[in-house]
Amino acid sequence: MNTMELDEGAGGAGAGAVAGEQIVEVTPSPGFDLETYISNYTGRTRANRLRFIALRVPSLQNDAFRMLLQEIKSGQNVQLYRDTLELIGDKLGPAEQIRDNEWMEKTQENNDKTLEKLEVELCQHKLNSIKEKVRMGHNDVGLHHLATGNLNEALKCFVRTRDYGTTGRHTMDMCMHVIRVGLEMGNYSHVTNYIAKAEQVPDQPDAGTAARLRVAAGLALLDGGKYKQAGLKLVSMRLDPPKDRPADG
């Protein structure tokens, strides 16, 4: 295996890659099909996987970058698109031929309009002093910031819902949103703190939420180099099979 070094401009767009990091080039196994593999993922995970492959598998780099641009354009994150174009450079041809300025302008305009609408609605809810409406308003603004890649603002919005929650379910929702953003940011102290808060909620979480909490805890332990504890946390999950499949399927 060979190694290659990312240039300084690659750090912002690489999944888990930082400037100057030595990463290992990977040779795919015979018969590996990128489209089939990536069909197992959606959303941010799909984009992160494609970026990871593009940076580490030279033989698949161009295809992975093309699919990555297509995936990003199915969402709202204009800054991620710009960062990815910078990462790609001229690998797919002249940058001016690859860059979709019309998509960037239209998407940014729609993002701005949506944010303005959500903030006006939130202000109206505050004037009416309806706690549940205010809580949901902060959630809506936070989800918009998350979709557009503004993670710091998303985090602020989700934390603010704490003051308007009235049930254990509301507290759990707040914790899960903050954990999600913390994972996206790579801020594992937030992840760990809000896992602890979620575990203190009196109401028992449903099976799906409990599994997500264990996954988040496992990732935080991995980040801290506590590999045995991470493994134990991850294998402790119990995922029920779909109702239309036998238990041993």
Image: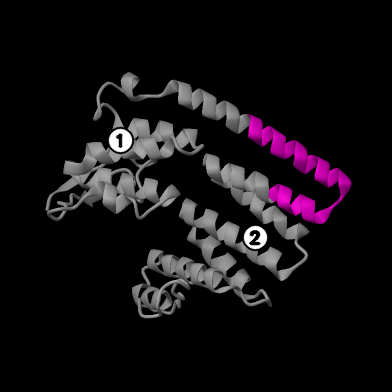
Q: Quadrant of residue 236?
A: bottom left
Q: In the image, is residue 137 part of the stretch drawn in magenta?
A: yes
Residue stretch in magenta: 113-138
Callout 2: SS:
helix
Q: Residue at x 62, y 30 (%)?
A: 112
Q: Residue at x 45, y 78 (%)?
A: 238
Of 61 and 187, which appears nearest the observer?
A: 61
Q: Is 149 above or below relative to 195?
A: above
Query: Is the residue marked by circle 1 packed among few (<14), some (14-19), or many (20+) residues within 10 Å?
Result: some
- Give left or right: position of 27 versus 67: left
Q: Main secondary structure of the magenta part?
A: helix
Q: Residue at x 53, y 57 (%)?
A: 180
Q: Quadrant of residue 101?
A: top left
Give residue 85's position: percent from left, percent from top.
36, 31
Which residue lies under the disc numbered 2? 174
The CA span between labels 2 and 1 is: 36 Å
Which residue lies under the disc numbered 1? 66
Type of the residue with mark 2: Met
Q: Residue at x 39, y 73 (%)?
A: 230
Query: Is the residue marked by circle 2 packed among few (<14), some (14-19), or many (20+) residues within 10 Å?
Result: many
Of 8 and 195, which appears nearest the observer?
A: 195
Residue 218: tell me if it is visible: yes
Callout 1: SS:
helix
Type of the residue with mark 1: Arg
- Give left or right: position of 3 versus 176: left
Of 69 and 9, which appears nearest the observer?
A: 69
Of mark 2 and mark 1, the one earlier in the sequence is 1
Q: Residue furthest right?
A: 128
Q: In the image, is residue 221 part of the stretch drawn in magenta?
A: no
Q: Is 162 above or below relative to 149?
A: below
